[in-house]
Amino acid sequence: MGDEVTLHEIISDGIAVADPNHASHNYSDRARRHLWLQMSRMGAYSEHNEVPIMVRGEGTRVYDANGTEYFDGLSGLFTNMLGHGRADIGAAAAEQISTLAFFPLWTYAHPKAIELAEKLASLAPGDLNRVFFTTGGGEAVESAWKLARQYHKMRGDTDRYKVISRDIAYHGTTMGALTITSLEAYRKPFEPLVPGAVKVPTTNFYRAPQHRDDLEAFGLWSARQIEEAILREGPDTVAAIFLEPVQNAGGCFTPPPGYWQAVREICDRYGVILVSDEVICAFGRLGEWFGGQKYDYIPDIITCAKGLTSGYAPLGAMIVSDRLAEPFQHGDASFIHGFTWAGHPVSCAVALKSIEIMENEHILENVRANEDYFRQSLLNLRDIPIVGDVRGTGYFWGVELVKNQETRETWSGDDAERLLRGYVSPEMFRRGLICRSDDRGDPVVQLAPPLISTRDDIDFMVGTMREVFTGAAKIHL
């Protein structure tokens, strides 16, 4: 095909090139006037505080309108598994656009949706063989709760409508998904929400209310909280439980040994549908395709998105067990639910190419090979007095910041605001590292880099954290 063409060159006729004739502050002015940012304090952007304008990406780096380079330590938003600027993914999208740019999955099908559904079924654990596409993660969660409700009603369990999820957990922002989400600040402006949400404790062993000296006992205690919630509410009223393999909000809470097996047994005992919400965790983030392969469990439904296309196009999915899909395969039954853009042909083509690259370039193996190095590098930060817990797995890590390592006293309120937004976040960014300073719970800094990241990349991320945390300790202790 001649000289290789990068994706950056393919799209350079657009605005994706830093142009000295279009200074960053001009973009910022226009953004402040017309662009409403997601989940952002718009008042934080003033004439003297520009909106960061990212104009291009290459590998693990992104570049702003001023030409400044940043390491993408959060994969965009836990999404860009393969790095930026892959021309082969762009070519797959272009080929599909020229073949069939769009057709809906309402009544009809198209080859790329069929091929991708088949591929996902081959990767998913157990008998999860049916794929219902969405355009994102929140929609996948919304779909799963609706499916659970309709499935139970079709079986005559008309009182099963409630949903269980864990404290602090985030599962999306549509009204149903927001009901499953457990973050009060996100929920309160939109109340009353959908009835039937029940909350249980997280698997945060660092702040365990019980069994603080026994991880396995704590895990079984955590699972029993789910059973007690089912019994409190009445087993015949609970439709489903939504859990992430590793909980994101609060900072990468990993499951204790035996936890998932106990949860699976509880769900089977009471006829509750187990949903593994893997919008973040799937497609290699934990070093496996799905959480069940990491922690040895088989859910009834997997919800996924983000890494499914490595961020190159919007797409989500609900992967469903044969058992749950079976009642919908006969007569005039149908799942009364759908989205215009679900399973978009271009997005499906991109997802197929992304999965192909992951397999051919041994991306999951790269994560597994570097997981222990990543962990130990972060654990070494505990010689800094404000570094408390280090938790996570694969390429998904959180470092909790504390006032006192021995007592585990946390930062809260104005102190946490000054620490995270006043110092840690801007200092990380100034040093060229994009990560997340998360105050949904105790203060945590999260890293979730592209899965192509090397040990040199890990050294850069952890080295930058060391500089910033050391500075923060001097200022705030």
Image (cartoon, helix red, strand yellow):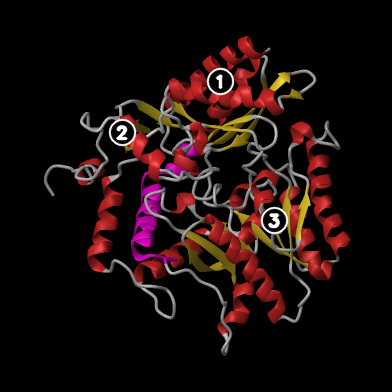
Q: Residue 125 is drawn in which quadrant?
A: bottom right
What secondary structure is found at the residue carrying circle 1? helix
Tell me which amino acid carries mark 3.
Answer: Glu
Earlier in the chain: of badge 2 and badge 3, it is 2
Q: Mark 1 = which residue? A: 423
Whether pointer 2 and pointer 1 mark residues with C-beta atoms closer than 8 Å, the reply is no
Magenta-drawn stretch contains 331:
no
The tag earlier along the polypeptide, 1 or 3, is 3
**How much space separates mark 2 and mark 1, taking CA atoms?**
26 Å
Residue sitting at x 35%, y 54%: 353
Residue 19 badge: none
Evaluate whether residue 390 shows in this view: yes
Q: Is residue 123 above or below residue 469?
A: below
Task: Write down the residue under mark 3.
Answer: 191
Which residue is label 2 attached to? 26
**Residue at 64% over, 41% down:** 249
Percent of width and height locating residue 119: 44, 63
Which quadrant of the rendered structure holds the C terminus? Answer: top right
Of discs 1 and 3, which sits in the foreground?
A: 3
Q: Main secondary structure of the magenta part?
A: helix
Q: Position of residue 450 (x, y in %)?
A: 44, 38
In the image, 434 versus 50, the foreground residue is 50
Residue at (66% x, 26% y) in the render? 416
Q: CA distance from mark 1 to mark 3?
A: 33 Å
Could you say which is closer to the camera, residue 196 or residue 106? Answer: 196
| Bounds of the magenta segment | 341-367
Q: Earlier in the sequence, mark 2 or mark 1?
A: 2
Q: Residue 183: x and y, percent?
A: 68, 46
- Disc 1: CA contacts within 10 A as few (<14), some (14-19) or many (>=20): some
Question: Is 139 on the left-hand or right-hand side of 232?
Answer: left
